[in-house]
Image (cartoon, helix red, strand yellow):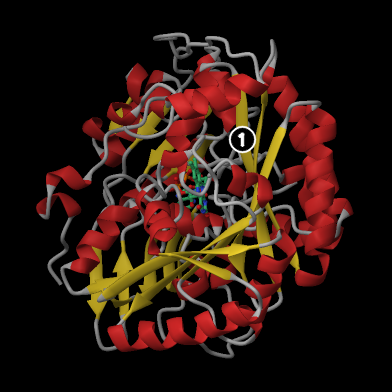
Amino acid sequence: MNERQPEELSPSLRQPEMPVTRWGDPAHAAPLPDGVRDLVGLVFSLGDTPAKADVAVPAPALAADLLDGLRAVVGADNVVLDDTARRQRTRGKSTPDLLRQRSGDLSDAPDVVVRPGDHDDVQAVLDYAAEHRIAVVPFGGGTSVTGGLIADRDGFAGVLSLDLGRMRSLLSLDPISATATLGPGLRGPEAEALLGEHGLMLGHLPQSFEFATIGGFAATRSSGQASAGYGRFDSMVVGLRAATPKGEVRLGGTSPSNACGPDLRELFLGSEGAFGVITEVTVRVRPVPEVKQYEGWQWPSFEAGADAMRTLAQGDLLPTVLRLSDENETAINLARPDAIGGEGAGGCLMIVGYEGTPSATAAKKAAVTEVLTGLGGTPLGAEPGTAWAAGRFNAPYLRDSLLDVGVLVETLETVTFWSNRERLYGAVKSALEGALGEGTMVLCHVSHVYATGCSLYFTVASAGGEQPLERWLVAKKAANDAIVASGASITHHHAVGTDHRDWLAPEIGDLGVDVLRAVKRELDPTGILNPGVLIP
Ligand SMILES: Cc1cc2nc3c(=O)[nH]c(=O)nc-3n(C[C@H](O)[C@H](O)[C@H](O)COP(=O)(O)OP(=O)(O)OC[C@H]3O[C@@H](n4cnc5c(N)ncnc54)[C@H](O)[C@@H]3O)c2cc1C
């Protein structure tokens, strides 16, 4: 097919580059809304902590002859050394990343940004990097929140950020099988626009949707806000192509499923750039829904709402969107960032969304409504659901505004079986409150559900004090330890990166770690790919 790039549809689809110290489109940055300022002012002493402006990135460490070699591989225009490009590819967008960058610490900046145009370019860059011991950090949208873009540079000639932003095409479409092959650098809205031209969509909507990429979703096993209906991203992947220092890998290209031994696609899904660079992703697609309806339900307690979710999941009755805020999150309206500080609904707010054809959504809604009503839920109508959908991508901007006034805000997530949900919830909450002290707000929602369990997504706000980064690192360690001690998983969808690496062995065992190391040795014998990320 004629490979289309998103800008052929509309140049405005491409969001601007994010500033290194903040999330998102700089034009959307705003001071703290009055309601939130009043609310947090009651709890924390508000200060003013502006980011240091225009901090210089360290001088590139790569020798001139190596830079010339890279220019020969991908063309001089695609070997970028300027400060802005290197600054924008320094780390990701976790609160620790932002705090480090706000304090002027750009020590993890790559030495050079290289922009391959296709799979062969990626392969050639990897071959060159392996030969000259240059560390390679695949860079999609740069939205990692687990330190997935921080390479250990010890023993390498330098660090190269491999920016996949030029690889943004719909490469092929099979409407009969309902599959599409996408370039790894397509951001969420760009992929949806290209598919939308054919009346199709993916339906993967993480909160980072506007900036994160197809390759990044696959490399981190991301999960979106409509996962109840459409599944997590790894479940949408039919096949993929990757470049590794040992050559090309093509997986899943022949069939929807098979019995050819272990499914090697799984080795690349969640591999966070440590095994290879994903250069094409074939995904399952579906028709653009004719109807989208979101609504709110109120529950007397978190437990009652969670039990209702479990009943839906185990009864094969999941709507497209299903999430449940705990009492604290409901009280401050976090599910509706534009209304924070306003009067909360009380109890626990559940958002339920239906997408599809008119008849399918009507049937699902009738069945879900009967179950939820029978279990004691109170319908709140469309307004809370519509407000949630309208503000679904706004919370990260609010984090920046809170950091601006000295409030420490961060999120973390985990997942467990239903029978362990309550224990996990209590353990993580106590760990965070214990580490951060009085006045800390810990909010939580059930973000993704399965027949057998659910993920819990925590938002934490506390006084930043003199050393907000150090305060957070202590709290995060306490939360990670509590998660592992509770028998839950260290991550449901944010991935391992460098931040969760030390908690991976307890989860997969020492032999599991050895298996990962063996795969790495086979595919990346010189260890140039994302050194230090994922593998303990
Ligand atoms: C505000 C905010 C909200 C978020 N919300 C969600 C959410 O709702 N759900 C969710 O799942 N995640 C969420 N995240 C986390 C993040 O967006 C996801 O991990 C996302 O999948 C990363 O995609 P990316 O393109 O930005 O990847 P990057 O951040 O660029 O990279 C992530 C990791 O994958 C590697 N990588 C990237 N592209 C490739 C490739 N083509 N081949 C091999 N390796 C590659 C990188 O080297 C890195 O280790 C959120 C993050 C932020 C900052």
- Which picture quadrant has residue 463? top right
Q: Is residue 169 visible?
A: yes
Residue positioned most to the right: 485
Residue 306 vertical position relative to residue 82 in the rendered view, above or below: below
Q: Nearer the viewer, residue 446 or 234?
A: 446
Q: Is residue 60 left or right of residue 84?
A: right
- Which picture quadrant has residue 310? bottom right
Other residues around mark 1 within 10 Å, as few (<14) / some (14–19) / many (≥20)? many
Q: Which residue is mark 1?
A: 410
Residue visible at 45% across and 49% down? Answer: 207
Residue visible at 81% across and 26% down? Answer: 437
Identify the image quadrant of the N terminus.
bottom left
Q: Is residue 362 left or right of residue 221?
A: left
- Which picture quadrant has residue 510? bottom right
At numbered mark 1, what does the secondary structure look like: helix, strand or loop?
strand
Q: Is residue 456 left or right of residue 202?
A: right
Across and down, in percent, residue 30 comes to 36, 25
Residue 35 vertical position relative to residue 184 in the rendered view, above or below: above
Q: Nearer the viewer, residue 524 or 103?
A: 103
CB at mark 1 closer than 8 A to ligand 1? Answer: no
